[in-house]
Image: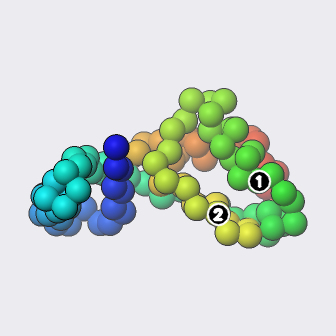
Amino acid sequence: KLDVHVVMKPDGIDDISLKIKRLLRAEAGETASITYPVELLYFFGPHFGDRPGIANKVFETLHQNGINFILSGFSSASVYLIMNEGMSSIAKGVFLKTFDTP
């Protein structure tokens, strides 16, 4: 199964959604579902790059609290999570208890 995730503003999503679904069906014989609205949860830790295991801790924390995400991205000091609408505030509360904040 092919999953396609497009993160964009909701303006025009219906038109783009139809085009993506048609393209996938025509080119690959696949079907697609478009998930929206979504939220971006971003947080920064100046020392994340110095500490191995940050990504593992993020995934472990989400899993232990039954919080799902759609996409994730990590840089040396930043964490990005795309989540279903309404989930970022729940995840934020859990992360505030998990990670030290200044």
User: Which label was assigned to residue 76?
Assistant: none
* Residue annotated with mark 1: 54
Spatial separation of the CA atoms under disc 1 and disc 2 = 9 Å
Farthest residue in the right direction?
50
Quarter of the image holding residue 97? top right
Residue 27 at x, y percent in the picture: 19, 61
Q: Tell me what residue is drawn at x 87 percent, y 66 percent.
A: 50
User: Tag 1: residue type?
Assistant: Ile
- Estimate the x, y position of residue 80 in percent, counting from the top left: 57, 60
Residue 68: x percent and y percent? 51, 38
The percent position of residue 11, horizontal first and vertical second, equals 20, 66
Tag 2's secondary structure?
Answer: strand
Q: How is the image coloured?
A: rainbow
Question: Is 31 displayed left or right of 76 in the figure?
Answer: left
The answer to which of marks 1 and 2 sits earlier in the sequence is 1
Q: Nearer the viewer, residue 55 or 23?
A: 23
Quadrant location, the N terminus: top left
- Residue at position x 36%, y 56% in the image: 5
Residue under circle 2?
A: 74
